[in-house]
Amino acid sequence: MPVKLPACEPCRTSKQACDHAKPCSRCQERGTLSACLYRARPFKKRRLEGAQEPPRAASSANPSLLPETPVTLDASLGILTEADTPEPSRGMRNYPNPGFLGSSSHTTFFEQLPRDTNDTGQLPDCSVDEEEIRMGANLIDHIHKYFQISSCVALVQDWIAGGVNLALAGPLVVTCAQVTEYVLSSCGTSSPAASTLARTISQKLFRNSCHQLNAGDHQSIAEWCSVFGAHNARWEMFGIFFAALAAATMQTPKFQPLYKSHQDQRDLQKLAVRFSDRCLDISLALDRLNDLQLLLQYENWISHSCLDGDQSYVSWRKLGDVISSLYALGYHERASANFLSMVSLREVAFARTFSGDTNVSLFLGRPARIDRKHCRWLPRQFHWSADAAVDYAAETQWSAICAVLKGEALDLFHEADYTEKVKKANLIRDEANLQWSSLPPHFRLETCLKDCHRTPKERDFLVSTLLNHMHVHFLLHLQLQVRVNEPGPELVSTSARMLSLVIESVLLKDTLAYSGTTLDWKVAYYGLAAAGIICLSLLKQGPTLFDNGFSKAQMIQDLNVLVAVVDAGVWIHPIDANYALLSRATLTIKSLLRRLLIKDARQLPGPVETNPSLSDLAAPSSANWNLWDNQHLQDFEVDFWLNLAEHPFLTETPTESLPTTQV
């Protein structure tokens, strides 16, 4: 007689044949590997409700089934005792979290069908098994092992006292820090009782995290934040705290209680991001998508962007997860009625993700994942008030406006008619200038940075605002180039201004504070793109390239400073995320500058040439060096600098050395 094998839950509930593999072939085809679960006792009939179950002796072979000693805690924590702690449920969820269902979903076709009288339309209780609770308790134990919670909270509070915060989850950071410290201070020892307490806290966190967060569209942000406290601590709140700790660690060079060296600082940042990942993974596994989880996803992506760099796959995937949650929650189709309402917070989340997706896609040369045609609202027109505050909301609004213009500039790539491309580019340029002129005067940086007497956060905001505006013009001029390796005067002039502002920001970094864009991002995203165009222009010098307010000497000086600050480790170190990219670029820039100085040294005794050309020193084969044409838009990432370094002019070994001065 053949042995009867059980079917997995998806096949059993759908009454389909199962091949009994783990996972089975049907679940593999559906792409639902995590749902392919088998019941522990598949052929035992369920007992009817109300039936008396005979008492069973506790098995000593499985300690997790033994009753625990009741634990008494502070009532304000809301920790459950043995009497009211629910038994962890096992098995798959009956129905996934549907999230936002649009007009093309299955609900459009089945909405008119009569529902079952027992169908309440509510999501079922999520299931948390004993293994998940144990993993949560282990996470709490590891937090106590590797962190001094009180010192970490002090670091976050000092960081916020400086006028900076998380760009999106800022209103919740103080609350999350206080709740995390209060909850975890209850199990700060390594005794057996502390392990039991950690498990009880884990149970409570899972129970609270399973509850839905149904914030109304017109509920104020302050009211929404006020519901979070020690009595309803959630895993998402822990994750937001660790994301804030990672940001505070990165932007605080020294904090004696926790670290003294840059290596210690980097290790603490990495550990904070790792624990933020763990809290986010737990929240995602519960399948309770909500606004708090969206905030955690965004800040977790920013943490990985700062730790690993935007060129890392982890950061790219994290950004995709944020975009998926935005679509699932339907925040791409909703508009705001009240600036202080929850809808406003959701729009800020969408705007920041939209601008981040556009900028990262440009930086990496990849397609953007948020399509503008699927979004009912986009911040194309915005009326600024004369007394608008310089804050994260204003930075978000301006970044989103520039992201829309950058996306339209990229669309010119598909325009085959050059005359039509120029016409559309002029319209985008006029729109960009109109948006810039509509900004309040105190939002525009119209002097040198050293002459701007504002707070550090406001100064950083002004730099980011101007760089975003100039980058729109940079992309427009770049799209109109017949050949990228022969940049025109407008593109070179815009690049020179961008690079000069980035270099000034690096030199005055101590007078800037985080306003939404880190200094590393300014240099890697704006500075390298501008430096790349300048390097190409110096290789292909023409009579009109340097007649737009920026001299050749000024551009060479800025390139020299960029090389010097990277080599000296002024603000970036070899263990930092973007160091490999910047160091590779500076090697090519140094080779170019060395050649320029050699040529100038050769020309000192003789007459000065009106329009010297660096191609005189290049090998004859340099005429055939053409890695770019008008069909490719360069992103100035690693490959750009690798290809530029292969230019014959830069690969040859100089036959003469620079004149040296004896001291």
Image: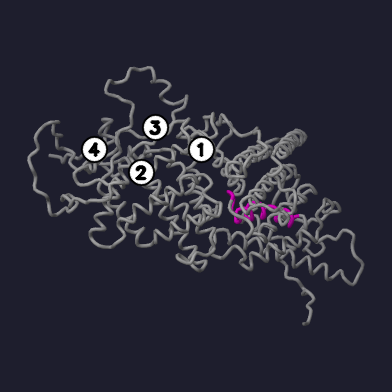
Q: Secondary structure at mark 1?
A: helix
Identify the residue under disc 3: 98
Residue placed under numbered mark 4 in the picture: 7
Left or right relative to 34: residue 559: right
Asked if residue 625 shows in the view, the reply is: no
Magenta stretch encompasses residue 39? no
N-term mark: 1 or 4: 4
Is 129 situated left or right of 286 in this image?
A: left
Label 3 amino acid? Answer: Pro
Instruction: Report whether residue 137 is seen.
Output: yes
- Numbered range of the magenta stretch: 515-536
Cα distance, mark 2 to mark 4?
23 Å
Q: Which three-letter amino acid code belongs to the residue tagged 2?
A: Ala
Residue bearing mark 1: 345
Mark 1 or mark 2, whichever is nearer to me? 1
Q: Residues within 10 Å of mark 2 (few under 14, many from 20)?
A: few
Query: How many angstroms separate mark 1 from mark 4 (CA)?
Result: 45 Å
Q: What's the image's color scheme?
A: one colour
- Mark 2 near mark 3, Cβ–Cβ under 8 Å? no
Binning the other alpha carbons within 10 Å of mark 4 as few (below 14), some (14 to 19) or many (20 upward) gives many
Q: Say what amino acid the circle numbered 4 marks.
A: Ala
